[in-house]
Amino acid sequence: MLILDETDLEILRQLQENAFTTTKDLASKLHLSITPVYERIKRMEREGYIKKYVALLNKEKLKKGLVVFCNVSLKQHTREIGKKFVKEIVSLPEVTECYNISGEYDFMLKILVEDMPHYQEFVMNRLGSIENIGNTHSIFVMGEIKNATALPI
């Protein structure tokens, strides 16, 4: 297991802020030469600290501005039923996040759609077609206060 030092953590912070930051720019900010910075990044990629690089898109411009958190409870709780539910949820592009949670509900879904009619269509035709859903509870986001993509390190 790789032990990260403060330089590694700063590299990760910088890359979380801007994945397009060049090795040369990172080296300059860290007062290091390019080669050790490059080697540290490659090592952290190999070790799985850096999973992938992505572009963050504007959901409103792409007509996915309605954010809904939908809590779901299953009628029955067996390993097979749970696996089948997860497989079906993962296949739905509108579901951008899915968490197995404790409490009254079994799963919490983050769903992105264009508007309320599109959400209604999603619930009736897509989510509603998944077997063994007992209860759902939808929470509609009225305004986004904070949406951080960076992990606190």
Image: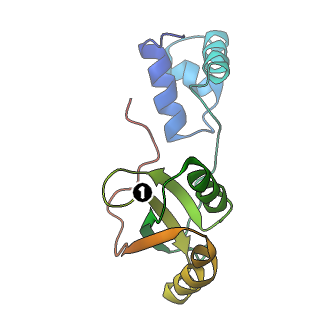
Q: Is residue 74 left or right of residue 81?
A: left
Instruction: Look at mark 1 in the image and give the residue it sits on.
Output: 106
> Is residue 56 or residue 75 the one in the foreground?
75
Kindly identify the residue that appears in the image at 60 percent across and 68 percent down.
94
> Is residue 55 or residue 130 the one in the foreground?
130
Kindly identify the residue that appears in the image at 44 percent across and 11 percent down.
5
Where is residue 36? Give x, y as percent: 62, 10
Kind of element beneath mark 1: loop
Where is residue 146? Give x, y as percent: 34, 57
Where is residue 72? Give x, y as percent: 44, 65
92 up-or-down from 78: above or below: below
> Is residue 83 or residue 61 the one in the foreground?
83
Q: Which colour scheme is used?
A: rainbow
29 up-or-down from 84: above or below: above
Where is residue 31? Give x, y as percent: 50, 13
Q: Residue furthest bottom?
A: 117
Kindly identify the residue that appears in the image at 50 percent across and 28 percent down.
12
Residue type, numbered disc 1: Asp
Q: Which of the 4 quarters of the picture holds residue 59?
A: bottom right
Kindly identify the residue that appears in the image at 65 percent across and 37 percent down.
52
Image quadrant in which the N terminus is located: top right
Q: Is residue 43 left or right of residue 104?
A: right
Q: Is residue 47 left or right of residue 14?
A: right
106 up-or-down from 115: above or below: above
